[in-house]
């Protein structure tokens, strides 16, 4: 198994979820957050409470999002793009 790097905004979402569900509020480094949406922190916080590990929580969310949400949506988009050249004569 290849290690996945947690990068970008993801650490902020993970810390927000952990802080939120451990009673520290929707905060990051002591400041209330109004920038990040609450769904990913909620999911990561719940999984953190179950696993006790932010990296494991992140990996579980990654598997769920990529394999059950993103891949099916991209395959649908790929099918639509593949069909587009066949449909173009109909539009002219």
Image: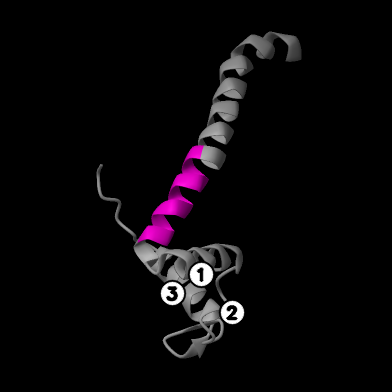
Q: Which residue is located at x 47 percent, y 43 percent?
A: 66
Residue 5 in the image, given as x and y percentages of width and height: 29, 55
Residue 23 in the image, given as x and y percentages of width and height: 54, 86
Q: Is mark 3 on a helix, strand or loop?
A: helix
Residue 32 in the image, given as x and y percentages of width and height: 54, 86
Q: Nearer the viewer, residue 89 or 42?
A: 42
Instruction: Please tell me the numbered disc located at residue 34.
Output: 2
Q: Is mark 1 on a helix, strand or loop?
A: helix
Instruction: Please tell me the numbered disc located at residue 15.
Output: 3
Q: How far apart are the two marked residues, 2 and 1, measured between alpha carbons?
A: 17 Å
Where are the magenta residues, as a range?
Answer: 56-67
Q: Is residue 49 above or below residue 76?
A: below
- In the image, is residue 23 part of the stretch drawn in magenta? no
Q: Can residue 83 be seen in this view?
A: yes
Which quadrant would residue 9 be assigned to in this image? bottom left
Q: Point out the residue furthest to the front here.
A: 50
Residue 28 in the image, given as x and y percentages of width and height: 46, 82
């Amino acid at each position: 198994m290849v290690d996945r790097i947690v990068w970008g905004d993801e650490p902020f979402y993970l810390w927000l979820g952990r802080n939120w569900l451990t009673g520290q509020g929707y905060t990051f480094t002591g400041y209330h957050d109004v920038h990040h949406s609450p769904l990913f922190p909620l999911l990561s916080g719940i999984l953190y409470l179950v696993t006790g590990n932010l990296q494991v929580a992140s990996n579980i969310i990654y598997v769920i999002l990529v394999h059950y949400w993103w891949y099916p949506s991209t395959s649908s988009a790929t099918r639509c793009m593949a069909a587009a050249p066949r449909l173009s004569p109909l539009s002219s």
